[in-house]
Image (tube, rainbow, N blue to C red):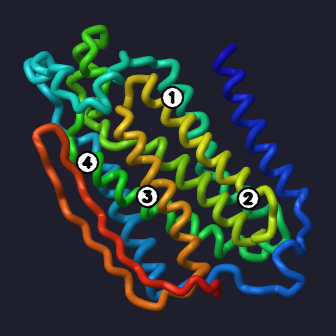
Amino acid sequence: MKKNKCLYTIISILLCIIHNLYGVPEDSISNKKRMVYRLKPSADIPVFIGCSVWATYMLLQLPNKSASTPEQVLSLNKNDINPLDRWATYPYNAGLDKFSYYPFYAAFPLPFIFSLTGNNMRNDFLKLSFLYGEALSVTGFFGTSATYFENKYRPYVYDAGASMAKRISPNAKSSFYAGHVEIVATSTFFVAEVYSSYYPDSKIKWLFFTTAGLATAGMGYLRIKAGMHFPSDVLLGASVGAASGILIPYFHNHKVSKPIDLTLLPFASNSISGLTMIYKLKYNTNKI
């Protein structure tokens, strides 16, 4: 019953979003038609194809990660986990893990459906679909790469109640970072950013960003309680997903005056490793 109520709540939120959208006049952007988003094929297509191909390749390689040995698993100590994550070594919860896939799969088509709810957006449906695909490809590029290259044990591995077969499986080393959370954040924040671009004078823009934040946090809660991810995995997944969902449409709505300066640097310590992304950009605040 609790699961059904949660599912009904998620559906109700989505219905409220669509209802509120229909309540916004079509001329709320401007009485004059203007181009909201501008694509640059010479840059967008290579980014989309490159990130998509790489993310797909990484996704196919994940099952090939090496399994752990029982000795390695038994030697793990909760006290070696960083303080932020140490409290979240929950046992595996199959029910919550399975249920988290409902909002996960629902998040994928949400921006496509949303793009059909207003005349101006329907006219730009193909453009918005491409932008969303580009956002997903960027999200996938970082998410699958991180999961493949970083062997971080899931929280349930530290719980003796889980079967040894599950604790030593390759998937048990895919905690870094939260892909479900990343996808939900990309989808919902993309919708919020697109809405704010088409309806800049709307008084309910905050509702879309708040809903996106709540949906992302809800998914994070499910993944933590299911024993699948640590809080740091969830925070990173939410940050990357939200950044992709917001910035991909945002930078197609603003004029960039100077080239992007992007630097990726690896970092490592005794307990954690990953990538540091330094992103420098100078742009005009004037919209296209």
Which quarter of the rendering shows the C terminus?
Answer: bottom right
Instruction: Kindly report which numbered mark, 4 or 1, lies closer to the viewer in this rendering.
Output: 1
Residue 263: percent from the left, percent from the top? Answer: 26, 72
At label 1, which amino acid type do we have?
Leu
Instruction: Please tell me which residue is depicted at 81% across the width and 64% down the height of the picture.
Output: 202
Q: Residue 249's quadrant in the figure? A: bottom right
N-terminal of the two: label 2 or label 4? Answer: 4
At label 3, which amino acid type do we have?
Thr
Q: Nearer the viewer, residue 88 or 97?
A: 88
For the residues marked 4 and 1, what is the alpha-carbon distance in whole angstroms?
22 Å
Q: Nearer the viewer, residue 91 or 41?
A: 91
N-terminal of the two: label 3 or label 2? Answer: 3
Residue where numbered disc 1 is placed: 222
For the residues marked 1 and 2, what is the alpha-carbon distance in whole angstroms?
26 Å
- Helix, strand or loop at disc 2? helix
Instruction: Give the left or right position of residue 278, taking residue 11 as reference.
Output: left
Residue where numbered disc 2 is placed: 205
* Number of the label disc, if any, that sits on residue 163: none
Residue where numbered disc 3 is placed: 139
Local crowd at mark 4 within 10 Å, few (<14), some, or many (≥20)?
many
Residue 124: percent from the left, percent from the top? Answer: 72, 75
- Helix, strand or loop at disc 4? helix
Instruction: Please tell me which residue is depicted at 71% across the width and 54% down the height of the picture.
Output: 206
At label 2, which amino acid type do we have?
Lys
For the residues marked 2 and 4, what is the alpha-carbon distance in whole angstroms?
37 Å
N-terminal of the two: label 4 or label 1? Answer: 4
Instruction: Please tell me which residue is depicted at 50% across the width and 49% down the height of the picture.
Output: 183
Number of marks: 4
- Helix, strand or loop at disc 1? helix
Q: Residue 77's quadrant in the figure? A: top left
Residue where numbered disc 4 is placed: 148
N-terminal of the two: label 4 or label 3? Answer: 3
